[in-house]
Each structure stands twice: as structure tokens, then as C-alpha cells.
Image (spheres, rainbow, N blue to C red):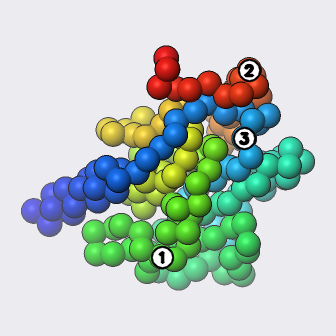
Amino acid sequence: MFQGLSKWLRRQAIKSRRKNLVRNKRFHSFDTAKSIGIVFKMEGNELPPELQATLKYLSQKRISYFVIGYYDQKEMPLHFVNTAHVSIFNKLDLNWYGKPRSVEVEAFLHQGYDIVIDFCREEDIYPVQYVVSTVQSSMIIGGVYYPHCPYDLIIDAQKVCNTSGYVEQIKHYLSIINNPQSIDIDEK
């Protein structure tokens, strides 16, 4: 009973926030994107090597980025310090049914990005789903299909490759999208 109510409230929270969300949907490539948001699930005490490599790649391309990670514990990871471009939220930053409510999450949601990439490839991580589903972005990329998923581009590499392979697929597809002025998704 309690879990059913919790799931219903989670769906309603996303639905309510998306109702007021105005997205200017457009396909972007690494050539047209000026800002990228990245959402991930923090597993250890530091950023995953694949994410660090991606951030270095974005810096080389001169694309601004902001990263937000969910740490599934009540305390923050040891020795991790939020920086200007990377923030972490944890279980203490969730309300009773799992909706994120931290200042960092709200800042991420309202920033506005050309592309948001969901690095989390697990289906049932509600705090990550909430952030990805309600972020202000022109294009959202993810690797897991779930009911009501918000992705504009799904990289279906979940069963065939590890995280570094998933990242390489994202880089590949965002590098080959040939759109000097970006293509309107709604026009197709």
C-alpha cells in the first residue's frame, strides 16, 4: 500500500513539473551545443573515469557543462567536494517519497541546456529519473527505456557494452549528427 502510494506520488510529481516545462526541442551535435548537463549515479568516492574523460572532452570542445550526481547513501562520499561544475545530492536531499529537493538539483533543473546526458543506466533510480524528466533542455539522451521516459535519443547499448562503450556511442552519435543550425525535432 505504502509503496503504491509512493510510486503514484512520484509519477504525479514528474507529470506536474513536466506540465509547466517548456522545452524547445532540437537535435544538437557537439558542434552546435554550447552547454551540456550530465546526470549520473555516484557509486564510489570519486567521479567515474568515463565521466572524467567526458568532462575533459567537453572542455577541449569548449562546451560548458554542469554535472549532478545522486549518491544512494545518507552521507556524502568520502573526500568528495562539490565544485563549480559538479554537485552531488544524496538520500538526505530527498523527501519522503524520493523526490529531490536540494538547492543543487533546483539549480540544475533551471539552468537550461542544449543537451542533457543521463549516464545512469539503471531503470529504477527515481531521483535520477526525476531530474532527467524535468530538466530544462533542448535534447535529452539516455540509455534505458522505461515508462514515460523523456529521452529524445536513446543509445541502446545497455546489454552490449560497459559504461565506457556507452560513452563512446554517445560521442559517436553526437559527432555525426550533421546539423549546422540544428534540426527542429517537432518538424519531423
Mark whose residue sits in front, 2 or 1: 2
* Observer-nearest of 116 and 181: 181
CA–CA distance in space, label 2 to label 1: 37 Å
Residue 48: x, y in percent? 71, 57
The answer to whether any part of residue 42 appears in the image is: no
Q: Is residue 50 left or right of residue 70?
A: right
Residue 22: x, y in percent? 43, 47
What amino acid is labelled 1 in the image? Ser
Residue denoted by label 1: 102
What amino acid is labelled 3 in the image? Ala
Q: Residues within 10 Å of mark 1 (few under 14, many from 20)?
A: some
Residue denoted by label 3: 33
Residue denoted by label 2: 178
In the rendered structure, which disc, 2 or 3, sits on the residue that comes first in sequence?
Answer: 3
**Which residue is pictured at 48% across the width and 76% down the height?**
102
Residue contact between numbered discs 2 and 3, judged by CB atoms under 8 Å: no
In the rendered structure, which disc, 2 or 1, sits on the residue that comes first in sequence?
Answer: 1
The answer to whether any part of residue 74 appears in the image is: yes
**Residue 160 occupies which quadrant of the picture?**
top right
Q: What residue occupies the far top of the structure in this picture?
A: 188
Q: Is residue 187 left or right of residue 20?
A: right
CA–CA distance in space, label 2 to label 3: 12 Å
**Which residue is pictured at 63% across the width and 70% down the height?**
87
In the rendered structure, which disc, 3 or 1, sits on the residue that comes first in sequence?
Answer: 3
Q: What residue occupies the far left of the structure in this picture?
A: 1
Mark 2, secondary structure of its residue: loop
Q: Which numbered marker is on residue 163?
A: none
